[in-house]
Each structure stands twice: as C-alpha cells, then as structure tokens.
Image (cartoon, grey):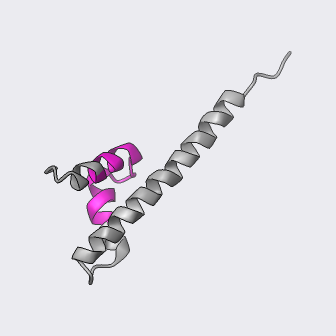
C-alpha cells in the first residue's frame, strides 16, 4: 500500500496561513487608522466592534476583508 501524497494539502495550509497573516496585518492597519478618529478607544475594542462582530463570532477573514474594503471606500454596510 502506498502512502497518499499530502503535498497539495501542505501547500494549501501554508498559503492559507500566509493569507491569514496578510489579512491580520490589513485588519490591524485599518484599526490603527480608526484609532486616530477614536483616540480613547482601546485597539481590541475597535477591532472587535469594527471587524470581528460584523464578520461573525468566529472571524471570517474573507468577510472581514470585505468589511475593511467597504469602509475604506466609504460604502455603508
């Protein structure tokens, strides 16, 4: 019996991990920008209110990026 190849799965996992880090960096940069408009609000509170809660209780990074994109473009959500 031969061992099935998991190379494709490993590549997908690595790519998703990279994309996850990229998305996290984008969210953090966006929240940093928001902090200039709300200087007294803690970073974590803003991140939860502006991204995590609208995207769902388990953050959906694709939806979170869509939220950031709409907000950057000034589109109402």
Q: In the orientation shown, which residue stands out farthest toward the bottom? A: 40
Q: Is residue 56 left or right of residue 74?
A: right
Quarter of the rendering occupied by the N terminus:
top right
Residue 14: within the magenta? no
Residue 55 image point, x, y percent: 31, 50
Q: Which residue is drawn at 65% across and 35% down?
A: 11
Residue 57 image point, x, y percent: 35, 54
Q: In this view, does 74 lie to the left or right of 56?
A: left
Q: In the orientation shown, which residue stands out farthest toward the front? A: 73
Q: Which residue is drawn at 23% across and 49% down?
A: 70
Residue 42 image point, x, y percent: 33, 78
Q: Residue at x 31, y 69 (%)?
A: 33
Q: Residue at x 72, y 30 (%)?
A: 7
Quadrant housing residue 51: bottom left
- Give the vertical position of 52 relative to 41 (above or below): above
Q: How many labels does the image show?
A: 0
Q: In this view, does 19 lie to the left or right of 77?
A: right
Extent of the magenta region: 47-68
Q: In the orientation shown, which residue stands out farthest toward the top? A: 1
Quadrant housing residue 63: top left
């Amino acid at each position: 019996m031969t061992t099935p190849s998991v190379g494709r799965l490993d590549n997908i996992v690595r790519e998703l991990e990279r994309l996850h880090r990229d998305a996290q960096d984008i969210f953090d940069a966006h929240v940093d920008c928001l902090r200039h408009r709300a200087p007294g609000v803690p970073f974590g509170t803003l991140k939860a209110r502006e991204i995590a809660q609208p995207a769902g209780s388990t953050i959906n990074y694709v939806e979170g990026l869509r939220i950031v994109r709409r907000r950057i473009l000034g589109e109402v959500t």
